[in-house]
Each structure stands twice: as C-alpha cells, then as structure tokens.
Amino acid sequence: QLIDPNEDGNGKETENTWDKRIKEAEVRAKKRAEEYAREQEQYLKELEEIGDTNEDLDAQKTGRFTGSIRPARAYLFLLQQYLRVACIWLRVLTNIIVWEECYISFWIAIMSFILSAVVFFVPWGFLLQWTLRIIAWVAFGPWMKLVDMFYYSRQDTDEQKRERVNKRQKRLDEQKLEAQIARERASKLRDFKQYMFGKHICRVNILKKDRYYDLPLPSSSATLYNPKSKSLGELAMQEAGYHRNRVNGQQLVGRMIPTIYETPTTEAPTGKPTKKTDLLEKGSPAAFYDGNDSYSAATIKVGSIIVGAGAITWFGVPLFVYLVRLVLPA
C-alpha cells in the first residue's frame, strides 16, 4: 500500500508545530546564554573589585601605573606571576625527586611501596566493570528524562531570579569586606614589623625553593652532640631559664596594636616537671614521664585500653571457660 505525502491532512500542521517548538527552544537557549554571559561579566567585574588578598609580608609594594614607561606590565605581570609559581613548584618537585627533600622523599617512597603491595590484591577488573555499569545505568538511564523535565527545563520565576541575584550579591559583598580586612591587616602588620625590626623583610622557606644548592666544602665537618644527663632539679632549672637570657623573636600578636610575643619562661608542659625527660639521669623520680601526651592522645590510649578490656571480657573469657571445660570435664 502506497502512502502519499500529506495523505492524512495533518502534515502541514505537524511541521508548523515542530518548527514552532524548535524556534521557541532556540530563543530560550539564546536568552539563557545572554543572561549567563551578563552574570559572568558582572561576576568578573566584582572579583576585580575584590582584588588580591596576598598576605605575604615580604611582597614588595608597587604602584599600579601602567602608562608609557611600562606599557606591557598590564598584560605580562599576571603571566609573570603564574610563571613564578610554576618555577617554584618545579624546583620543589625536583628537590623531592633527587632526594634533596629527604624526609618527604622517604615518606613518598614508603607509601608507594605500601600502596603497591595493597593494590596488588585489589580485583581491578571486577571494580572497573561494575563501576562502569553503575555509571551507565545511573547517568544514562531513561529516568534522566525526568531530571531534564523537573530540573533543567524548569523556568525560574522572577522572584527566584531576584533571590539568586541577591544571594550572589550578598556573597560578593562579604568577600569584598573580608578581602579589604585581610589587606589592611597585612599592611598594618608589615608596617609594624618594619618599624620595630627594620625595613627589610624576608620569608624563611619551609620547602627548598633555591635555584642553586648549598653544598658543604671538603674542609667541613660535623660532630655528634651528646648532652650530659642531669638531675631533675638541674634540668628543671635549665628549662625554666636559669642563667639564660632569652631573646624574644619577631612574632607579633594582637589586632589593634600588635606586640611582640613573649616566650613562656619554662619549656615544661603543664602537669609535667620537665619537657626533655630523655636527659634525666637513670633512676630519677621523673624518668617515668617518657612522653608528653596531649589530651587527645591520652584519651585515645585510655579508650583503647577500655575497648581492649571489653573485647577480652566479651570474647576471651567465654573462650577460656570453654577450653577449661574441655580439659577438665565435670
């Protein structure tokens, strides 16, 4: 049986309906794209108003003049900052690989060996197969049509749009205020440190970021330091600062008027006679303090003892009674 074009008489109407739906979808998508572009442009402008919150005290203060003297600064300065960060982390990574950062390299090597032994027994084929199956069924199943209908295709009302804009504006205002406070605090702290200790400020690196290594000379030497054992009274007096002049560092504390942090007069923690118990003589009355456990460490130890005692009571005692009954029948 042959079917002629537009035989049912509704062909023209169906085409018009589909054309109308397509045009409405295109207009709706174009409108969303324009709104998103406007929102992103406004968001980027407000981020520029927030500015940089660099709290690095050794950063140099430079003006924002980008005139004819340095016309390329406005375009290349940001790229230069990214290249600086890349160079620093490449140096750190190089030092870890060549074992200049020996502690970090050691722990990375140990963890690599442990993970290699652990993942050797993991059934990767089974996990990969079922992971891909779950992803395929969850993310590409027929119910995704419901997600499109009730989430993505839903039009926001004017009230919801205003609420979204107000929330974003409130969040950006909070970020502006936090950035302003951070800049003011860093500037004040820098000025106080320059007033107290001099105008030159230098950051002491924790990781090795040097371009050139400091290698010892052939004439260099090292001597093992073995401190002498002391009695409890001698060690306590030494840690309390007896016959020692303590010079405070350059750490400042306080918000309104920063002051120099005063180091505690004694090194011993609260509740302990001394800190370095390994320097005590053998047989000293405080030699049993072999550690300086914190509250959390002490809680973990006590908790583990209680859990172990409960496990022994719950499992060990019935097993022991059962063995006794086997050996000594009634």
Image: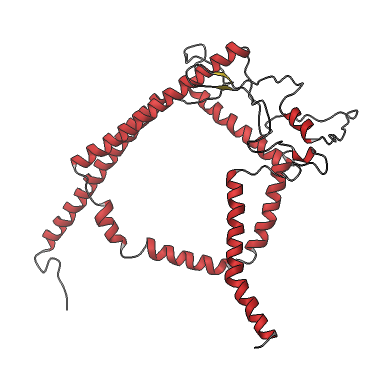
User: In this picture, is 319 found above or below 214?
Assistant: below
Q: Is residue 49 visible?
A: yes
Q: Position of residue 174 (x, y in %)?
A: 36, 30
In the rendered image, which quarter contains the N terminus? bottom left
Please state the horizontal and vertical placement of residue 299, each as a whole percent of the image: 58, 50
Picture quarter containing residue 138? Answer: bottom left
**Number of callouts in the render?**
0
Residue farthest to the right, as pictured: 219
**Closer to the camera in the image, 90 or 21:** 90
> Whole-percent x and y of residue 6?
12, 65
Q: Quick one: which residue is furthest to the bottom in this view?
A: 330
Which of the 4 quarters of the picture holds residue 315? bottom right
Left or right, 228 with respect to 297, comes to right
Q: Residue at x 88, y 31 (%)?
A: 221
* Image location (x, y in percent) of residue 256: 47, 18
Q: Is residue 41 in view?
A: no
**Front-most of residues 154 and 273:** 273
Q: What residue is at 35 percent from the left and 31 percent from the top?
A: 172
- In this rendered view, identify the residue nearer to me: 127 or 103: 103
Say whether residue 114 is left or right of residue 171.
right
Left or right side of 8 for 73? right
Q: Is residue 31 above or below residue 85?
A: below
State which quadrant residue 43 falls in: top left
| Colour basis | secondary structure
The C terminus lies in quadrant: bottom right
> Which is nearer the eye, 171 or 12?
171
